[in-house]
Amino acid sequence: MKLKVYKLNENATVPSFATEGSACFDLCACLCEGSDEVLVYHNVDSEMIRTTNGKFIVEPRKRVMIPTGLIFDIPKGYSVRLHPRSGLALKSGINLVNQEAVIDSDYVNEVKILLTNLTSTPFVVEHGMRICQGELVKSTVTDIVLTKKLPTSATRDGGFGSTGV
């Protein structure tokens, strides 16, 4: 399977697999000259901020939208799923805002990564830094059917926490 990638910025990093056994490809920040501004989310408002020197500081407990400088040409019947990088999450408290992002095959705009800083320490994102990972996933066509009968289970009775800790 091939995932075509278009570079909006000549300095954008083409996604790649870190090792032969990697399940996902890495996506990098595009914070160089000519890239989009970073969108910073506050409680209610948001603002666009121009990066300086190919770096952007993600302030504690803030949400940001980081440009990649890339557009994906996702094959019909597939989507790209974005996942946090475990090293960034563990070592720096940097995670995806929505934990997993879904990019549909009919989305043909720049891929931007929604990051959040869960710590009390500012975090510097630099141009070319690997900030999340993605995978091409086959979509399943699902027919949604309304029913008047509640589902039942012969093996499970209970809700959240019913199977123990």
Image (spheres, grey):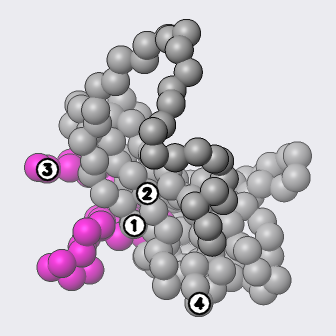
What's under tag 2, amino acid-wise? Leu
Which circle's residue, 4 or 2, is located before the other in the chain? 2
Which circle's residue, 2 or 1, is located before the other in the chain? 2
Q: What is the quadrant of the C terminus in the image?
A: bottom right
- Please check the rendered image and state whether residue 117 is part of the magenta-colored stretch, yes or no: no
Question: In the image, 35: left or right of 37?
Answer: left
Instruction: Tell me the tag on residue 156.
Output: none
Q: Position of residue 95 (x, y in %)?
A: 60, 69
Which circle's residue, 2 or 3, is located before the other in the chain? 3
Label 4 crowd (10 A; few <14 / some 14-19 / many >=20)? few
What's under tag 4, amino acid-wise? Lys
Q: Residue 82: which quarter of the image? A: bottom left
Question: In the image, 105: left or right of 68?
Answer: left
Distance CA(mark 2)–CA(mark 3): 17 Å
Q: Is residue 17 in sight in this rendering?
A: yes
Q: Is residue 73 in sight in this rendering?
A: no
- Please check the rendered image and state whether residue 14 is part of the magenta-colored stretch, yes or no: yes
- For label 3, the residue is 2
The range drawn in magenta is 1-30
- For label 2, the residue is 82
Distance CA(mark 1)–CA(mark 3): 17 Å
Which circle's residue, 4 or 1, is located before the other in the chain? 4
- Which residue appears at 71% of the width and 73% of the height? 117
Are the residues tagged 2 and 1 within 8 Å (C-beta)? yes
